[in-house]
Image (spheres, rainbow, N blue to C red):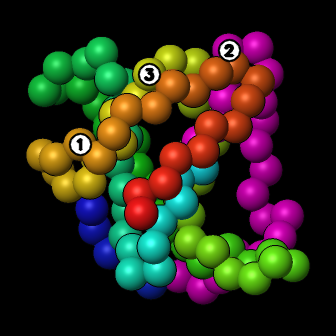
Amino acid sequence: MTGHQSGPTGAGSVILDLGGSVGALILATPPELHGQEIEISPADGGAGTRRTHAMVRRRETGAGSSYAAVYPGLAAGAYTVWRTASTPAGTIVVEGGQVTRFSLR
């Protein structure tokens, strides 16, 4: 994970294109991970598997603030969520046409 600073993301600022064999992941985190980039990778891959990352941002809604990284446009399948470069936090399954949620709390 690497850190960056970003402003809050307002309602409606993330567009998810879902359908067929394409889904998305919303990764909820505690506030202290704000600005960190969290990696995911296909779960069936080996050590050289390419990882994708997204930044944790503060998300403002009518219900208040939350913190999350959003991974749009993921091919359906199992993914490893990485807590650190070498420590997995868990495995999730993305279904086509759906949004999968996972919490790093």
Q: Residues within 10 Å of mark 3 (few under 14, many from 20)?
A: some
Residue at the spot of label 2: 21
For the residues labelled 1 and 3, the Cα–Cα distance comes to 13 Å
| Distance CA(mark 2)–CA(mark 1) | 25 Å
User: What residue is at 50 percent from the left and 18 percent from the top?
Assistant: 77
Where is residue 101 drawn, in percent x and y?
60, 45
Q: Position of residue 76 (x, y in %)?
A: 58, 19
Of callouts 2 and 1, the N-terminal one: 2
User: What is the spatial separation of the Cα atoms under label 3 and label 2, in whole angstroms?
Assistant: 13 Å
Write down the residue under mark 3.
78
**Could you tell which of marks 3 and 2 lies nearer the N-terminus?**
2
- Residue name at image x 20 percent, y 55 percent: 84
Q: Is residue 63 magenta?
A: no
User: In the image, what residue type sits under mark 2?
Assistant: Ser
In the image, residue 41 sits, relative to residue 81, either above or below, namely above
Front tag of 3 and 2 = 3
Q: Magenta segment, which residues?
A: 6-25
Q: Is residue 22 magenta?
A: yes
- Kindly report which numbered mark, 2 or 1, lies closer to the viewer in this rendering: 1
Looking at the image, do the residues carrying marks 1 and 3 touch, with CB atoms under 8 Å apart? no
Residue 20 x, y percent position in the rendering = 76, 14
The quarter of the picture where residue 12 lies is bottom right
Quarter where residue 28 is shown: bottom right
37 left or right of 24 in image:
left
Visible residue check, residue 53: yes
- Can you identify the residue that label 1 sits on? 88
